[in-house]
Amino acid sequence: MATALLTHADCLDHVTPNGHPERVARLEHILLALEPLDLKRVTAPLAADDDLLRVHPANYIADIRDSRPIEGFKQIDGDTFMSPGSVDAAYRAAGAAVRAVDMVVRGEVSNAFCAVRPPGHHAETETAMGFCLFGNAALAAKHALDHHGLSRVAVFDFDVHHGNGTQELLWDERRALVITSQQMPLWPGSGRPDETGAYETVLNIPLPPGSGGTEMRSAYEAQAFPRLRAFRPELIIISAGFDAHQDDPLASLNWTTSDFAWITGELCKIANEMCDGRIVSTLEGGYDLNALSEATRAHVEELMKAAR
Ligand SMILES: [Zn+2]
């Protein structure tokens, strides 16, 4: 079976001010890097409000829609901006994750990657932050649980920043396991090991600045992977941020492209053991254009290998 690639041109219309790291060129570089690959290409739909309402209240969704500027930018947080195209982009990013869950759970494809922006893992219930508007990974998990009736969904977040939004949105969801590794200290500052969720379904793995793939691999093998296997997920959702790469300008971990391939391969192995290989991956961070596009391609190639 195939690997799906979900994206939409609307995600290129979410524009940020000059010099902002979360920029249109990120997605352009990724799409170029993925162009030669034999993927099942799917147009990302707009999310339905019902999908967003599983994690955000109606007044927050209305606020985001109302914050869209007619021209220029609207700043809604220290580092989060909206342009005229941002609402549609955010609805496509969320819609991609939901559609990817549909395709993977129904067995139309083995796994899927959502090449979308804005990212999602910092968005909290009623707070847009860290370049994120809607909690794409969390709402995809809720869709799998509530719409498809799955019993256990895992979210695995290897972005260099803490997935505070995903953690908060799924804090009291005992059917979802959230595993997130992050450089610590680093913005947003949360993600300590004692943050474990209302039902002990959150696992935080802090990694020290300057550490590399060796430290990451031993932490994942000691903590993350055993926990993931013990949970017996029926679907794994990956928050795929590539900003732990050694070339990334926003953080100081020293992972290489082959580390991202290794993580993906290991998650595919676990998914094959547990849930017929079901993986939905959605783009989060990654701000060095070459590192980002190269690591994303390596990630997607591993998904494709597992899908064969
Ligand atoms: Zn990040």
Image: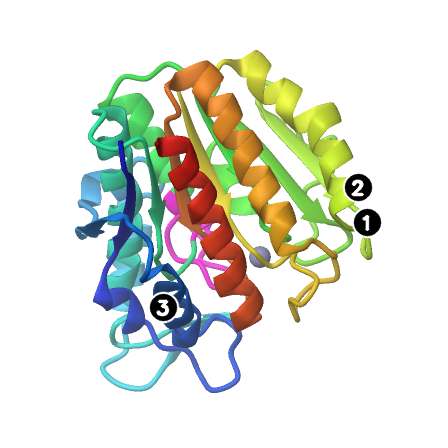
Look at the image and say whether residue 53 sits in the magenta stretch. Answer: no
Disc assigned to residue 215:
2
Identify the amino acid type marked 1: Pro
Q: Is residue 288 above or below residue 34?
A: below
Q: Nearer the viewer, mark 1 or mark 3?
A: 3
Q: Residue at x 30, y 35 (%)?
A: 54
Residue 53 visible to an observer of this rendering? no
Left or right for 298, reference 141 = right
Residue 49 visible to an observer of this rendering? yes
Label 1 – label 2 distance at C-alpha: 9 Å
Going from N to C along the chain, the mark reached first, 2 or 3, is: 3
Identify the amino acid type marked 3: Leu
Residue 210 coordinates in the image, percent (x, y)? 82, 57
Going from N to C along the chain, the mark reached first, 1 or 2, is: 1
Q: Is residue 187 above or below residue 280?
A: below
Q: How is the image coloured?
A: rainbow
Looking at the magenta stretch, what is its main secondary structure? loop
Please tell me in which quarter of the rendered image ligand 1 is found.
bottom right
Which residue lies under the disc numbered 3? 32
**Which region is colored magenta?**
120-136
The answer to whether marks 1 and 2 mark residues whose Cβ atoms lie closer than 8 Å is yes
Q: Is residue 102 above or below residue 188?
A: above
Q: Nearer the viewer, residue 151 or 40?
A: 40
Q: Residue at x 75, y 33 (%)?
A: 219
Disc assigned to residue 208:
1
